[in-house]
Image (cartoon, rainbow, N blue to C red):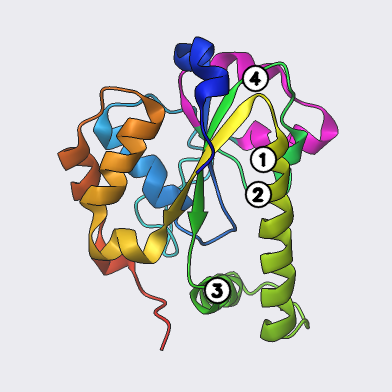
Amino acid sequence: MVSCRRIEEHQDQAIIIVSGLPRSGTSMVMRMLEQGGLPLLTDNLRQPDEDNPKGYHEFDRVKDLAKGDTAWLFDAKGKAVKVITALLTHLPSAHTYKVLLMHRNMDEILASQRRMLVRRQAEQDPTSDDEMAGLFREHLKRIQGWMEQAANLCYLDLDYNAMITDPLPAATSIREFLSRSLDIEAMAAAVDPALYRQRAG
């Protein structure tokens, strides 16, 4: 975790970003925040399905960050919005951000991504799992390096696998990091171990 002292003056206006690789548990964290009492920025255009039966909690315009669509961020102040790591560097410096960065066992991420592609009958990426894992790890390392240098941003690392086993410590850490009055018991109860379907080993 990086210290948030540099953005303490803007605590109430900070935009809460839930980020991670696809299939790393970001939807679960969005659900936790919602149950804890934090407002979300979502549009419900992407409906729940077999891969995410409790919903994706996405805001579709986030996909256009790289194209310069950033005006919606004014409506995100004080709220949580999901942004994949590949788009984080497109967040404009005019705002302050607190990022909840999800980590998950890489084998599980890859297995979950493959399963999703099979369900959607989408074309499979020919890249091997070992190569893809290496690319993902390098990507995360680069993103974390960028966040550590950003003057308008701080982040909290969260471990999906640990949260599934015992969500209360993570819920407590999130509340302390965000400096918001959140119901940590409700947040912990939002974690559904039954949805942990791609398990390493």
Tell me if residue 58 comes above or below residue 15 in the rendering: below
Q: Quick one: 116 or 4, which is closer to the camera?
A: 4
- Report the predominant secondary structure element of the magenta stretch: helix
State the separation of the CA atoms marked 1 and 2.
5 Å
Mark found first going from the N terminus, 3 or 2 = 3
Q: Which contiguous range is marked in magenta?
A: 60-80
Q: Amino acid at mark 3?
A: Met
- Compared across the picture, whether 45 is left or right of 131 comes to left
Q: Amino acid at mark 4?
A: Trp
Crowding at label 2, few (<14), some or many (≥20) Cα neighbours within 10 Å? some
Judging by the rendered image, the residue that carries numbered circle 4 is 72
Measured as percent of width and height from the top left, residue 171 is found at: 28, 43
State the separation of the CA atoms marked 2 and 4.
24 Å
The residue that appears at 33% across and 63% down in the rendered structure is 162
- Compared across the picture, whether 125 is left or right of 114 comes to right
Q: Nearer the viewer, mark 1 or mark 4?
A: 1
Q: Nearer the viewer, mark 2 or mark 4?
A: 2
Judging by the rendered image, the residue that carries numbered circle 3 is 106
Mark found first going from the N terminus, 1 or 3 = 3
Measured as percent of width and height from the top left, residue 156 is found at: 48, 43
Is 11 a magenta residue?
no
The residue that appears at 43% across and 52% down in the rendered structure is 158
